[in-house]
Amino acid sequence: MDKNYKPITSMKEVSEQLRKLRRQYLRYQQAEIIYSIFHKKLFELASDAGAIYRIDGTVLINRDIFDVYLEQFHELATGKDKVVYGICT
């Protein structure tokens, strides 16, 4: 077996590493792609969330604040065979 392979890490370690790599501040163009929201609506929501930072003509969105704000719009599934967080009811 080739010794260039790295050992398998646990899923917990992988998710922690991904969290570290994730950008905390996004430009509008990046946020539009990540959240699939058009510029006007993104600006409105980010303003309402208080997640906008303006630095020398550059506008950044704090992803942590924006994600928390977006969660208030989450709707639970409705219907006979609804699935909530992977649990059938």
Image (spheres, rainbow, N blue to C red):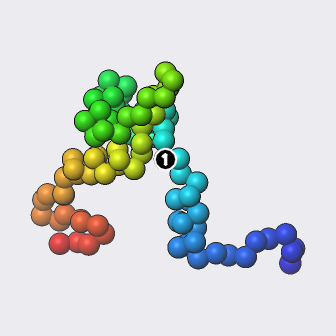
Say which residue appears at 64% left-offset and 75% top-offset: 9
Badge 1 marks a residue whose secondary structure is loop
* Residue type beneath disc 1: Gln
Does residue 14 appear to the left or right of 61 in the view shown? right
Q: Quadrant of residue 51?
A: top left
Say which residue appears at 46% left-offset and 34% top-offset: 60
**Residue 36 in view in this figure:** no
Q: Quadrant of residue 38?
A: top left
- Counting other residues with Cα less than 10 Å from the Cα at mark 1, is it few (<14), some (14-19), or many (20 or more)? few
The location of residue 58, given as percent across then percent down, is 50, 26
Q: Which residue is mark 1?
A: 24
The location of residue 22, given as percent across then percent down, is 53, 51
The location of residue 25, given as percent across then percent down, is 48, 41
Q: Nearer the viewer, residue 41 or 4?
A: 41
**Residue 71 in view in this figure:** yes
Q: Quadrant location of the N terminus?
A: bottom right
Q: Is residue 89 above or below residue 39?
A: below
Say which residue appears at 23% left-offset and 72% top-offset: 88
Q: Nearer the viewer, residue 87 or 71?
A: 71
The location of residue 59, given as percent across then percent down, is 45, 28
Q: Is residue 89 above or below residue 72?
A: below
